[in-house]
Image (cartoon, rainbow, N blue to C red):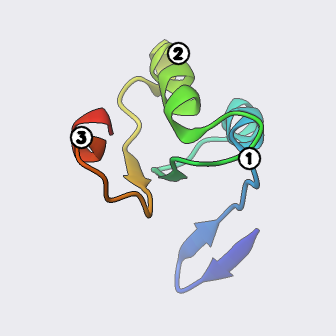
Amino acid sequence: MLKNNGLTVELAINGQQVLDTLSRQDFDGVLMHCQMLVIDGYTATHKIRQQLHLKNLPIIAMTANNMSGDREQY
C-alpha cells in the first residue's frame, strides 16, 4: 500500500488479487490492466460488475493493444 498526498494505492499483480482485495476493503475506483495474469482484466471487471455492492465502482481500463476493435471490446 502506498500513501501520498491523500491518495492511497493498493497494487494487485493479477486479476484474482484484484477480486480478493476488493472483497476485503473499499475503494473509490480501480485502474485495471486488461492483460493481467491468472484472471485478465476483462474477466475481473465482469466479476466485479456481478457484485451488487461494486456495480457502480468506477473502473478505468488500460492496455497497450491498439488493434482494430480493441476499443469496442473494452
Q: Position of residue 73 (x, y in %)?
A: 31, 34
The residues bearing labels 1 and 3 have C-alpha atoms spaced at a distance of: 24 Å
Residue 68 as seen in the image, left or right of residue 23: left
Badge 1 is on which residue? 14
Which of marks 1 and 2 precedes in the sequence?
Answer: 1
Look at discs 1 and 3 and give the one toward the viewer.
3
Badge 2 is on which residue? 51
Badge 3 is on which residue? 69
Residue 13 as seen in the image, left or right of residue 55: right
Residue 47 as seen in the image, left or right of residue 73: right
Residue 44 as seen in the image, left or right of residue 21: left
Q: Amino acid at mark 2?
A: Gln
The residues bearing labels 2 and 1 have C-alpha atoms spaced at a distance of: 19 Å
Q: Residue at x 33, y 39 (%)?
A: 74
The answer to whether marks 1 and 3 mark residues whose Cβ atoms lie closer than 8 Å is: no
Q: In the image shown, does 36 or 30 lie closer to the viewer?
A: 36
Q: Amino acid at mark 3?
A: Gly
Q: Identify the secondary structure beneath mark 3.
A: loop
The residues bearing labels 2 and 3 have C-alpha atoms spaced at a distance of: 27 Å
Q: Amino acid at mark 1?
A: Asn
> What is the number of the mark on residue 4?
none
